[in-house]
Image (tube, helix red, strand yellow):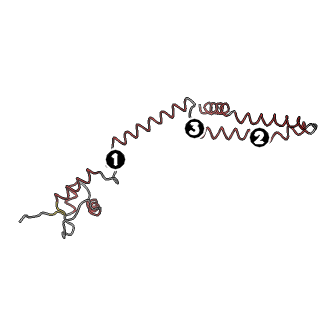
């Protein structure tokens, strides 16, 4: 008959270099098992083997399970993408959303102002006109001017970005 030596949670914790609480958590998670009908005692060899296998498989809930190479590859990829974005910004192929929002807001405000000014500018002139074709041409000319200003996004955007860069410096 072989004499079996069993250990309590404190001894297992010291042997595995973890806390007693962690030993109980591992037991509750069914990673390690108490010896049958022992009321909180563990057989050393199977407990150590179970714990080692658990560590080999990696604990997805633990910070220790992070794959260094995978994380490093993600970091390098993120840095590369960041550098590519920075280069595109410098080459004016990519723009910050704040810059685009500011330019679009300015353009739309200017467009609205131009459209709102048409009646006050043209009413004295148009009140003297009787030829519908002439009235149409004058209105069309002013509306086309406002639309052309709205369609010239690249020029307005370039000017606005340069102004913002100068004000930042």
Question: Residue 96 — which label?
Answer: 3
User: Which SS class for mark 2?
Assistant: helix
SS class of the residue under badge 3?
A: loop
Q: In this view, does 161 lie to the left or right of 73?
A: right
Which residue is the extreme one toward the left? 1
What's the distance in space between the residues labelled 3 and 1, CA to CA? Answer: 33 Å
Secondary structure at numbered mark 1: loop
Mark carried by residue 66: 1
The x and y percentages for residue 28 are 29, 64
- At a point 51% along the width and 33% down the height, the residue shown is 86
- Give me the residue at 44% from left, 39% from top: 78
Label 2 vs label 3: CA separation?
26 Å
Identify the residue position indicated by label 2 in the image: 113
- Dividing the picture into quadrants, the one containing residue 129 is top right
Q: Mark 3 Cα within 10 Å, few/some/many (few <14, many 20+)?
A: few
Residue at the image position 33 percent from the left and 40 percent from the top: 69
């Amino acid at each position: 008959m072989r004499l079996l030596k069993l250990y309590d949670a404190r001894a297992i914790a010291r042997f595995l270099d973890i806390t007693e609480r962690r030993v109980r958590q591992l037991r509750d998670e069914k990673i390690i098992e108490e010896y049958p009908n022992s009321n909180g005692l563990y057989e050393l060899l199977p407990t150590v083997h179970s714990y080692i296998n658990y560590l080999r498989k990696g604990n997805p809930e633990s910070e220790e399970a992070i794959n260094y190479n995978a994380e490093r590859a993600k970091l390098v990829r993120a840095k590369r993408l960041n550098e590519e974005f920075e280069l595109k910004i410098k080459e004016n192929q990519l723009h910050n959303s704040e810059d685009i929002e500011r330019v679009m807001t300015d353009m739309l405000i200017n467009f609205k102002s131009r459209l709102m000014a048409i009646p006050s500018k043209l009413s004295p002139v148009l009140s003297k006109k009787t030829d519908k074709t002439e009235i149409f041409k004058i209105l069309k000319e002013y509306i086309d001017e406002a639309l052309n200003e709205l369609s010239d996004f690249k020029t307005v955007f370039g000017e606005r970005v340069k102004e913002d860069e100068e004000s930042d410096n």
